[in-house]
Amino acid sequence: MQDSGYFQKMTEGLIHTYYLDQDWNAALSYFDRNQVSWIGVSDQAMALDYDKLKVFFEKGCNSKYEIRLLNENYSMVSKGEDFAVVIAQFLINSRVDKNGFFSLRQRASFIFHLCGGQWKVTHMHVSAPNSIVKEKEYYPEEMSVENYRLLKRLLIEKTQQMEILAQTTAGGMKGSLDDEDYTFFYVNDELCNMLGYTYDEFMEMSGGTAKGAIYPPDVPKAMRDCRECFKKGDEYKTEYRIRKRDGTLLWVMDYGKKVRDANQEVIINSILTDISEIKETIGQLEMEKERNEIVSELSDDIIFDYNMREDELQVFYPASIAGEKHKKIIKTARVSDGWKELGVSPEDEAEIYKKIMDISNDKISNKTIKAEYRIVDWNAKNIWRRVLMRGVFDSEGNLAKVVGKVVDISSEKELMLRSNTDFLTSAYNRSYLELAVKKAIRNKGVDLYYACLLIDIDFFKEINDKFGHLQGDCVLIEVVKMCRALFRSTDIIARLGGDEFMIFMRDIYDQKIVLEKARKMLDMAENYSIRDDIPDRLSLSIGIVIDDDIAKNFQRLYHQADIALYQAKQNGRGRYMVFEEGMMHPSD
């Protein structure tokens, strides 16, 4: 007489051959040909001989759906010298399509007899503990479709909501049984894609369980979190790492809830969210220690601490009492809101952010990066500030924080401005212009042009003689105001001396822009009255050079613009001319 394990293994082999291998012919080999009976779930599912059983099995194995068996249990009920009775219980789990799935519990009893010296199944009875079982549900294909439609109707709202949530977050969705290892009955494509696996690869890696998917060192805490949460209610939340297909570890937050399915069985629906980018990778104490060391080395100005990961800006302002500081914390989803606290304009913010990226790319924590920006106070006075920044990096070399100070450099800027500008008009002087033009040409963008506009006031000597030098000075000032109103803040406006001005335009993508600016400049001058009570009009002549040669120096640029200006005056004044090769100046 065989032991109980023999019959349990034999039953398991029959179940696997039929459901997993879909091999109806091999499954029939377990049955006795001469005496066999089989009862399925529905009224019509019954066979009292081998040939009838063959028809049912052949039809039932033609399933196009992927089937998995879960929670298998095989129990020996009774046995004698020539018979044995085994009861099998298992869960059929099938993935119907990308978003559709179902699970169905099955029970089956098997009677074995010793027939011609071999143990064969002489009777099999299948049942499904489901109040909504319908006709012909024994067969995997038909049963799969019927149950999928049923579950889709009962759970469609919840499934759609969870799918939308999974697709709109950095994560995926899973469904688990409420067993010891939380066996999967569903895993969506978003979760597999997030980890770099195909569905089959993920199921193999995890062993088909939520516990098996967790990085082993994190299993105890994750399981403990779940147990503690379920003691308090139906919901749980925990964090752990999963090993991706490429071998790296991904931090996830696992949040889910226990619900009952259509069979009134407890299942767990869960959302997994990628939290790697916001997970601390170094000890908070070490980071705080390094931050405090950097802050202590900086002078007693406005101190700031910007946490890149949390997008949190801490600003330490000098207090009214010497030696003390008060702190303000700005936590925002937008970096720009934090920099506004320091008075940084949107235009200057881009430059500061570029400096921060320089820190990140260099990966040198003791390197100080400088940036300057300007704010305008309530009485329209310019206040210049300099930002000094240093980076704090985590153990993986990623920039975690930027710590720095803000210094008021208005006095320094004012002195520099005076040395670089014309006293009368506040336009830049020639010495500054030459240096700025040289730098701008050298750093010109690819496929971009630069332009030089040399402006001369027509008959300016007559204006001085007719209206006086004081009125002439007003005209010079007014010309600079026109230029500032018309040209970009990045364009350089300079007075070269007397009534001669130069405007340098950098990074121009279309040459027509330069000509349009010149026309508007002539119109603005023509519409200007030298004095309200005298209808005299202002006239300008403009020589223009447009080029993309990064090797050209200021002297060459000025000479070509002067030739074009001469041609404009020769052609009647009050107009502009663009330099072309072949143009000559009388002095050449």
Image (cartoon, rainbow, N blue to C red):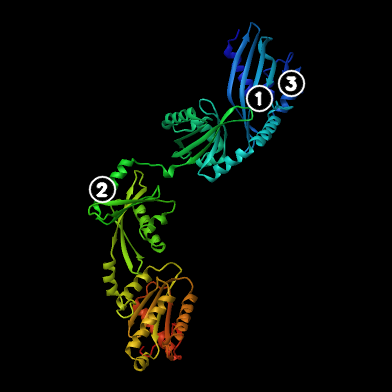
Which amino acid lies under the numbered mark 3 shown in the image of this protein? Leu
Task: Please name the residue shown 39% across and 55% down the image.
Answer: 338
Q: Secondary structure at mark 3?
A: helix
Please state the total of marks drawn on the protein image: 3
The x and y percentages for residue 581 are 44, 82
Give the class, few, some or many, for how many residues have Cα within 10 Å of label 1's Cα (few <14, many ≥20): many
Which residue, as the protein is rendered here, is positioned at the far top? 81
Name the quadrant of the N terminus: top right
Q: Viewer-nearest of labels 2 and 1?
A: 2
Which residue is under mark 3? 53
Residue 124 position (above or below residue 195) = above
**Can residue 364 be seen from the camera position used here?**
no
Residue 264 occupies quadrant: top right
The x and y percentages for residue 377 are 35, 66
Which residue is under mark 1? 18
The x and y percentages for residue 298 are 25, 54
Name the quadrant of the C terminus: bottom left
Front residue of 289/397: it is 289
Which residue, as the protein is rendered here, is positioned at the far front? 320
Q: Secondary structure at mark 1?
A: helix
Which amino acid lies under the numbered mark 1 shown in the image of this protein? Tyr
Q: Secondary structure at mark 2?
A: helix
Say which label, 3 or 2, has the lower sequence index. 3
The x and y percentages for residue 457 are 39, 87
Which amino acid lies under the numbered mark 2 shown in the image of this protein? Glu
Say which label, 2 or 1, has the lower sequence index. 1
Front residue of 108/521: it is 521
Which residue is under mark 2? 293
Q: CA distance from mark 2 to mark 1?
A: 70 Å
Say which label, 3 or 1, has the lower sequence index. 1
